[in-house]
Structure formats: structure tokens, C-alpha cells
Amino acid sequence: MLLTKPLLALRPNRSDWIFAIKTFCAGMLALYIALSLDLAYPIWAIGTVFVIANPYTGMTASKSMFRVLGTALGAIISIIFVPMLIHTPWLFTLFLAIWVGLCLYISLLDRTPRSYAFMLAGYTTVIISFTIINTLGTSTVFDIAIGRFIEISIGVLCSAVVMTSFAPMNIGPGIESQISKVIDDTQQIFDKILLGEIHFKHPDPAQHAQQQEIASPNYTQELNLLARDISNLHVMAIHLSYERSKLKDMTKPLQEMLHQLSILVANLVAMTERLNQLHENNHKFQHALNHIHKHTATFFKHADVEKNPDLNLLPDQFDHDFEQLARTVRPEQRIVVASLKMDVRHFIQNIRAIHLIWHRIQQGDYSLPENVTPLTTQYPNLHRDHGVAVRGGISAFLVVIIATGAWILSGWKAGYMMAEMAAITACILTALDDPIPALKMFIRANIYAIFVIFIYAFGIFPNVTEFWQLALVLAPFIIFCLLLYPHPPLNAIGLPLIMGVIMGLNFHNRYSLDPVTFIDSSLATVIGPIISIWIMRMVRSMSPDMSAQRILSMHYNAIRKALYIAYGPQFRIHLRGMLDRIGVLNTKTVQSEQLKHDINRAIIECSAVVDLTRLQELMQKLNKDDVLLNHLEELSAYLDDYLRAKEFNQNAEVFLDKTVSKIRLLMHEVSNVSDLTVSQRIQISLNNIEKSLCHVTKQDLAA
């Protein structure tokens, strides 16, 4: 029911009231202008204000711009194709279905605000086309298309003027505080790692190995949350170009800094994995780690990166501290210490780069440090799920075909509205793993809206003769709905409720609403979404567990691709995409314990990906007839088979056994390499691959 527990617990604060009142004023201004110009459908002017409404001006402005662009594209397509196809209903239906499906497919691949433009272009074409058909003989294609564009533009302009002129709330300060928190969190986790405050895997051998791993060390949860926050910040940063905060136009340098932060997460994971190895049988080295932490913390405190931007600076005692650490471990563990030393060195370099970039951003400087390679491409290499996009496009295609076909065959006068609602609902919520619960809430809101429309249309509006009276009687309901916007659990009913009422009331200068039209339109607004639910349940809907499993498959595929990428900017971009995928993966609320276990492992596996490319780099330095080179090539083939089996959720144990056996053999062979630097680097990479990618424990080796 509407009066749910979250609604009863709602306590709007001052900013909620300011947002609601501002948005209401913008909506009334848009409606007044549209009525003054005697536009055909003033509801689209006021409706646009409520659709793009957001407490943050940057988000409102970005959505406004892409709404205008999407509407313009939809209007252009309508003007071109409606006259050509209007006399062939089934061919026209096929064209609209393909167009909506294609637009939605592109929209689902783009995780930026511009995705809204593609989605809107799809269903705007449907709305304009069906409106033209419904008013055939009284309006021209051009008039309807231009009118729609003008109505949307009025709503956008009124929203922009009101939201930016009166108590604007920028997203920049929120992003700034969130980034500062993420940077602080990374350094705190680094402190916990070196000070031994991280909870490592349970050492009790009596505990079942699988239970040990599923329990997972706490650090993976903290770092998974960091990866998720970085992915969210990357998307939020795009809105900075549309507001007047201190970080305005800093989207690109900010995203570069977020790229560096994501690499830092992988670096922290690698450090903790190495310490996990050292903790297996040895707990006597914590004193040496305390010295490393003390000197590193002092270095961070006194080495001012703004005054000395050399990112390769290290603490004076850095080499000596790790020599002391190496003396506290067994000889066979010294390769792990060497790997840890490399990871700590990279952490220091990366954190200094991040501090320097962040300082420059806050000073309004767009430039990056000279030795920081930009990772932002023209189209950033972030996670995209083509499978979900294809299924979304197909579901939209089928919804348009079925809903429009039902309209054509039935001849129902309000059938055009049913087809419009089906097309809209097939698009707006498809980005969710399972859109069905949200669509059911949408239908519920439409049913509530029918009762509100009936009260206004037949009980209140007959007594309204002036615009100020209209605004006065609408204010309580609209402001109430707008107060729900800033609260995620309630937004799902606030937005469809307010839009259902606004669309249903269909404001005009010569207002009239007869009971037959009211009943027909009410049925259409409910039946349309039901068609979407029916199709999307069969084609598009998936559980969070299924979605997580798909992302994990893409994760293993990305690791396999890393086998053949040379270390450099291309690899760093590839790793950035992998870490972004981990951030998306951690937004899934999965039920399966095994999936939770695999998700925790995924971020650990990312930390070993760099070792795959380092092996490729070292292989190029070996002679073609070198036996070691042949072994390394065989290892790459085994890893490829192992990761391919993981990708397709097959039994990978056979390939894992071959891979581990080859790694153990290579560890023996590498010890005979004359070049000690090459030997050590290969041993470090083999160790990291074995422990972090193959997840081999000491108990596994003993078995």
C-alpha cells in the first residue's frame, strides 16, 4: 500500500522543502508559459520539470541537456519517417520497434548521463508518431514534432532558471568530500595492513578450507566498497560540467585521478595477499613491519608533494627496512618480501600522484604530472554488458510490436496511449537487474493517480477559473510527491505518481474531461505497463545472482585477455576497466554464498593481473631456444584454459592442477637463471599468480 513504513518514517528536512518548493514553482512557470502560448500539449512542459528534477543543479542541468537532444532526435526521425510509413501500419510498427530497441541498446551500453538522450530518442519517436496518428487530419507531422520540442524546451528552461537562481545545491562539494574520504580510507587501510590490524584468514587447520575462504578476510569487504565508491564517483563527476561549483569543468582530471585511485585499490589488495602468505607460518616479523609503517607515515607527513612533485621519492630508510624484514622470514619467503617491497613502493608512488593531482584540481589546474600516463580515452574503457543491452533492446522491440499490434487490431481509440505507455515503461527501468518490481510499483502509482485525477477533474477543477487557483489546488499534492524524490525508497512511487496525475489531467486553456475518455485513458495507462511486465519477465528480467554470475564471466574473460597485453598504457586502461567492473559487481545484492565468495576473490585476482603482463615482458628477453621460455609459454596456455573454464562456469580443477604443477616446476627452473634480476622478477610474478589468481594455499600444496 501507499502508506508504507518508509513513508510513515519520512521526515523532510530543510533542503527537501526547498527542493520541493523550487521544483513546484518551476513546474507552474512552465505550465503558465505553455498555456499562454496555447501549445497543443502543455502537460509536457510541466511534466519535463518533474522528470528532470533533482536536488543537485548539475544533475538537473545534464539531464535537461540530454533530454532536449533526445527529443530533437526523436522529432527529426518522426518528421522523416512518419510521412513515408504512416499508410503501412505494420511496416511502420516494425520500424518503430527496431528504432526503440536500437536506441535502448545504445543507452544501456553507456553508463553516463548521455545514455538518457538515446533512450529518450527512442520513445519520443513513438509518442510523437502515435500522437500524429491519433490527431490525423487536424495536425501536421511538423507541427506536432516542433510543438513537442518547444514544450520540452520550455520545461527545461524554466527548471534551469529556477533551480540555479534560488538556493542552488551543487554536487561538487559532495563529490569533493567523498573523494577526500576515499583517499583517507585508502591510507587507513594501508596503515591497518602494515600494523597487522587486518583480520587475516583463520589459521586453524581443523577448519574446512572452503569455509575459510568463503569467510574471507575483512580487507576484501573494505576494498570492494572502495572500488564501488570509485565507480560511482566516476559517473557522478560527469555532472560537474553543468554547474558552477569549485570543481566545474574538472571532470577529465578528476576521472584521471579516480583511475589512479582504482589502480591503488589493486595495489592494496596485492600487499595484503603477500602479508597473508607471510602470516601462514610466521608471526615474528610484525616489529619490522611497524618500522616500515612508521617511516612511511613520517615520509607522507613531511614529503610535501606540492613543493617536490617528484613521484619517485621514497623514505630514506626504505631499502634498509625491507632488508631487516627479509632477515625475519625463512629463506623461501624472501621472494614474498621482495614482492611486498615492490607493492609498497608502487603504493607510495601512486598515493603521491593522487595527492598531487587532487591538489592541482583544487587549485583549478587541469594538468597532470609529467610521469602520470593519462588513462582516459575518448570513450572510457569501463564495464559494459552487451548481453543485458541486447536483451533490453529485444524486450523493447517485442513490447512495441505487441502493444501497437493490439492497438491496430482492436481499433481502440485510447489504444495509442496504451502503446505509448508500453514503449515508455519498456525503456525507463531496463537498466535494473530485475525491472519487474519497479514496474509493478509504477502500475500501483498509476492506479493511485487515477483516484487523484478523478478527485481533481470532477470535484475540484469545475470550480477553478484562474491560473493562481489552479496552482493553489495543485500545490499540496505536487509538493508532497516532490518531497519523496530525495529519498530512494520513496522516489519509486513519487515520480510515477506525480507524472501519472499530470499526464492524466491533460491541462488545456479550454479544459474538459468526459467520463468515457477518463475511463479509457485510465485503462490504457495500466494495460501498457502490464504488457511491458509480461514481455520483460520472459526476456529481460534476471536475478542479482544471475547478473553477478554474468559479470564474473566477463571478469575471467578480461583476465584471459590480459595474458596477451603488454605492460603499458593499454594494459593500465584494461585494468581500470576490470576494477570498474568489480565496483559494479559489488552493487549486486546476491544470495548465493558461493557467489559472495567468488566476488571477494575477484578483487584479489585483479591484483595478480599485472604479473601476467610482466611475465610476457620477461619472456621477450629470453632466447627462443631457452627451455624456460617454452615452460612459460606452456604456463600461459594452461592459464588460458583455466580462465576459459572459469568464464563458462565449467569444471576448472583439471586446468588448475596443470597450472600449479607448471608454476612449481618453473620456480625450480628459474632458480638456475644467471640474471638474478630476471630470476627474482619471474619468481615474484609466479608467486603472485599462484597465490592470488589460482588461490593456492599452503594446505593445497601439502595435499
Image (cartoon, rainbow, N blue to C red):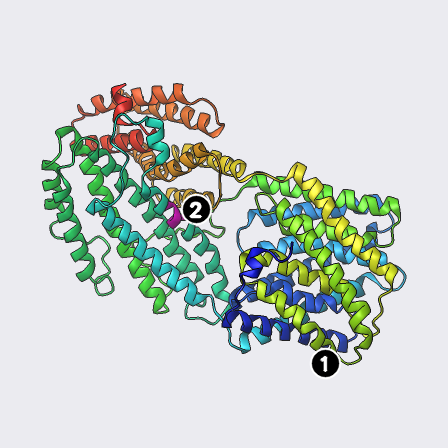
Residue 114 in sight:
no
Up-down: is 626 above or below 35?
Answer: above
- Disc 2 marks which amino acid? Gly
> Looking at the image, which residue is at 19% across and 37% down?
338
In the rendered structure, which segment of residues is drawn in magenta? Answer: 223-227
User: Which mark, by number, is residue 693?
Assistant: none
Which is closer to the viewer, label 2 or label 1?
1
What separation in Å lies between label 2 and label 1 (alpha carbons)? Answer: 49 Å
Q: Which residue is mark 2?
A: 583
The quadrant of the picture occupied by the C terminus is top left
Up-down: is 227 above or below 642?
Answer: below
Residue 601: x %, y % from top left: 37, 36
Evaluate if marks 2 and 1 touch, with contact meaning CB atoms under 8 Å apart.
Answer: no
Q: Which residue is mark 1?
A: 468
Label total for image: 2
Q: Nearer the viewer, residue 211 or 648?
A: 211
- Disc 1 marks which amino acid? Trp
> Looking at the image, which residue is at 76% across and 78% down?
36
Does label 2 or label 1 sit earlier along the sequence?
1
Residue 295: x %, y % from top left: 14, 53
Residue 610: x %, y % from top left: 33, 38
Position of 123 with respect to 178 (left or right) is right
